[in-house]
Image: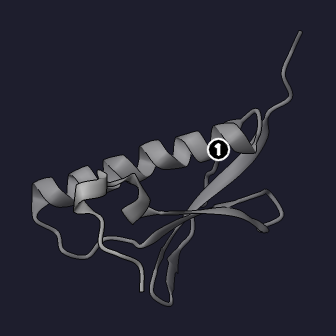
Amino acid sequence: MEVALRRFYFHLSAGTEIALDEEGTELPDLSAAKGEAVLAARELLADAIKSGDPDVPEILVIADEAGRPLANVPLATVLPRSFRLPLP
């Protein structure tokens, strides 16, 4: 049985700035897109830590092909609990 794939876009949000994902990724559903977003967030944070870059996006926004936001993954949520700051 063939699974229908949908294209999801992973935009990076930092303050009022948004970096759009122009290519997107084909995945079976939103649950898979959320899993992909968590992996991408971990990779972004790891790269920023390794390079010493203090400017890291705050949120990874998952959008559909029409550009509608479907879910947000705050990058801070992928940090180990002991490294998370309390939310305001």
> What is the x, y in percent for residue 33?
64, 44
Quarter containing the C terminus: bottom left
Residue located at (12% from left, 53% from top)? 50
Residue located at (39% from left, 53% from top)? 78
Quarter containing the N terminus: top right
Image-based side of 64 in relation to 81, left or right: right
Image-based side of 88 in relation to 49, left or right: right
Quadrant in which residue 69 is drawn: bottom right
Image-based side of 1 in relation to 40, left or right: right
- Figure label count: 1
Give 86 or 60, whichever is nearer the viewer.
86
Quadrant in which residue 7 is drawn: top right
> What is the x, y in percent for residue 30?
73, 45
Name of the residue lying farthest toward the bottom: 16
- Tag 1 secondary structure: helix
> What is the x, y in percent for residue 39?
44, 42
> What is the x, y in percent for residue 11?
56, 65
Give 27 or 34, whichever is nearer the viewer.
34
Q: Residues within 10 Å of mark 1 (few under 14, many from 20)?
A: many
Image-based side of 17 in relation to 2, left or right: left
Residue located at (66% from left, 37% from top)? 32
Q: In this figure, which residue is indicated by the disc labeled 1? A: 33
Residue located at (53% from left, 49% from top)? 37
For badge 1, the amino acid type reads Ala
